[in-house]
Amino acid sequence: MLPRSRTLPPRMNHGTIEERQDIRHYMQVEIQPKAQSETEAINPLSNYSKCFDDDGRLKRTGTFWTATSHIITAVIGSGVLSLAWAIAQLGWVAGPIVMLLFAIVILYTSGLLSECYRTGDPVTGPRSYTYMDAVKATLGGRKVKVCGAIQYMNLFGTAIGYTIAASVSMMAIKRSNCFHKSGGKDPCHMSSNGYMITFGITEIIFSQIPDFDQVWWLSIVAAIMSFTYSIVGLSLGIAEVAENGSFKGSLTGISIGTITKAGQVTATQKLWRSLQALGAIAFAYSYSIILLEIQDTVKSPPAEYKTMKKATSLSMSVTTVFYLLCGCMGYAAFGDNSPGNLLTGFGFYDPYWLLDIANLAIVIHLVGAYQVYCQPLYAFVEKWSAQKWSKSDFVTAEYDIPLPFFGVYQLNFFRVVWRTVFVVVTTLIAMLLPFFNDVVGLLGAFGFWPLTVYFPIEMYVSQKKIKRWSSRWIALQILSVTCLSVSIAAAVGSVAGVLLDLKTYKPFKTSY
C-alpha cells in the first residue's frame, strides 16, 4: 500500500480556505454573463446559480417537515428510559410540571439560538454551520474555548453513558430469557463487564469509519430503533396499568422508608434523588448542541430562523406529549419501584420476546448514537493533530486499501490508534462506574445550563445588541441564573447518587 498524501483530507484540514475558493469559483462562473436587467446588476444574489446558496454551497432543500423530523429524532433517545424513574422521585404533581417547565425553557432558548444562525442579520448575515461557529462569530475570545471544552466533555461523557445503557439492555435480554425459563424463580444475577467489552469492541470497529458524512445510514437505523423501544415501553406501561386496574404512585413521589438496591430511602436521600431527577429530565430534552446543524439544512426563503422556530414548536410539543406518556405510564405501572431504565424493570417477563425486541432496539440505537456523538470529537482531535504534527506520516499519511464489496478504505494509523484508545478509555470508565441514572443525571446537569441556556442567551443579547440593565436584559439574566441553579442542584444530586452507590459497589465485580 502506498501513502495517499501527507495530510488528512483537505475537507478536514483546510475546510475554511477551500470553502472560500469554492465560493469564488461559483461566483466567477455565474458572473461571466452580463446582467440582463438593471435589477440583476443591482442585486448580486440574482447572479447565483439556482444550484447554490449565497455561501457557495449546494442549495439547502430542508423544509419545516424535515427539520421537525430531525429534531424529534435527535431528542427522543435513551433519555426517555429514565423518565419514569424521574417522575417517581418527584411525584404526580411536581413530575409533570417540571417536565413541562423544561420543555418551555428549551423551546424559548432554542428560538433565541435559531436567530443566531446568521451573524449580524438573521436573514442576510453570514451563516454559522455549527454551534461552535456561532459562538466564535458572535462572542469570540475565551468563550469559544470554554464552549468547546464543555461540548467535547459532554460528548465524552455521553459515550460513557451509552456504553452503560447498552450493557444494561444486553443483560436485560439475557435476564428476561432466564426469567422466562425459570418462571421467575431464578434471580438470574450476572456481571455487566462482558457486555460492556462486547459493546466496546463493536464501537472500535465502527469508529474506523473516517468521516461523519459516511455514518448517515447508521443514524437512520438508530432513529428507527429509538422510536421502536420507546413505543414498546409506552405500550407495556399501558398494558400493566390496564392489568392492575389502577395507577400506582403518589402525589409527592417515592416514600421515605422505601427499600431500594442502595438501601432504605431516607429524607436526605429523597432530596438527592429529586435533584438527580432534574438532571435526568434535562438529559432527555437536550439537543441544542446540534440545533444549528439541523437549521443549516433548511432552505430559504422564508428566513431559516422562521422555519426553525415553527419546527421547534411542533417537535417540542410532540416530544413533550410522548415523554409525559412514557414517564407517567411507567410510574403508574411501577410506582415507587420504577426502574432507572424502564425496559429493565422485569415487570414484563411474561411477554419476554417483546422485551427482547425493545432492548435489542436500544442496543442497535446506541451503537449508531455513539458514533453520531463521537464523530465531531474524533474530527476535532484529528484536525488539531494534523496541524501540530503536519510532517509526521503516522499522523497525516493515508493509505488506500481495497476492500471487497466496499471499495477502497482510507487507512490512517493515527486515526486507528487514537479512536481505539478513546473507546477503550470510555469502556473502562463505564465498567468502573456502571450507574445509569447517576451518569444520565450528571450529563444532563453538566450540559443543560451552558449549552441550552447560557450561550444561546449571550449570543442573542450580542446579536440583538440588547442594552445592559434594560428590562429585556434583566429578564434573560434571571432566566439564566435560575437555570444555573437547577443545573447545580441536579449535579449535586447526581454526585450524591454516585457516592451512595459506591457504598455497595466493588469495581469490576458488581452484578445485576
Image (cartoon, helix red, strand yellow):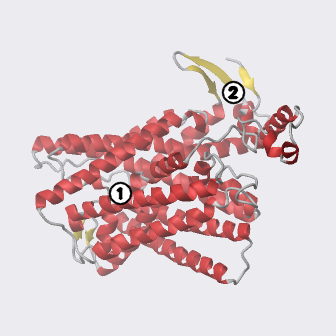
The percent coordinates of residue 183 (x first, y second) are 9, 46
Nearer to us in this view, 215 or 146: 215
| Number of marks | 2
Query: From the image, which quarter does the N terminus lie in?
Result: top right
Crowdedness near tag 2: few (<14), some (14–19) or many (≥20) residues, C-alpha within 10 Å: many
Circle 1: element type: helix
Q: Is residue 292 above or below residue 356?
A: below
- Give the CA distance from mark 2 to mark 1: 46 Å
- Residue on which disc 2 sits: 398
Write down the quadrant of residue 110 in the picture: bottom right
Write down the quadrant of residue 131 in the picture: bottom right
The percent coordinates of residue 259 (x first, y second) are 21, 69
Name the N-terminal-most of marks 2 and 1: 1
Q: Is residue 212 visible?
A: yes
Do the numbered discs 2 and 1 sit on residues whose CB atoms are within 8 Å?
no
- Residue on which disc 1 sits: 322
The percent coordinates of residue 425 (x first, y second) are 51, 47
The residue located at (57%, 52%) in the rendering is 290
Residue 471 shown left or right of residue 391 in the figure = left
Nearer to us in this view, 43 or 70: 43
Circle 2: element type: strand
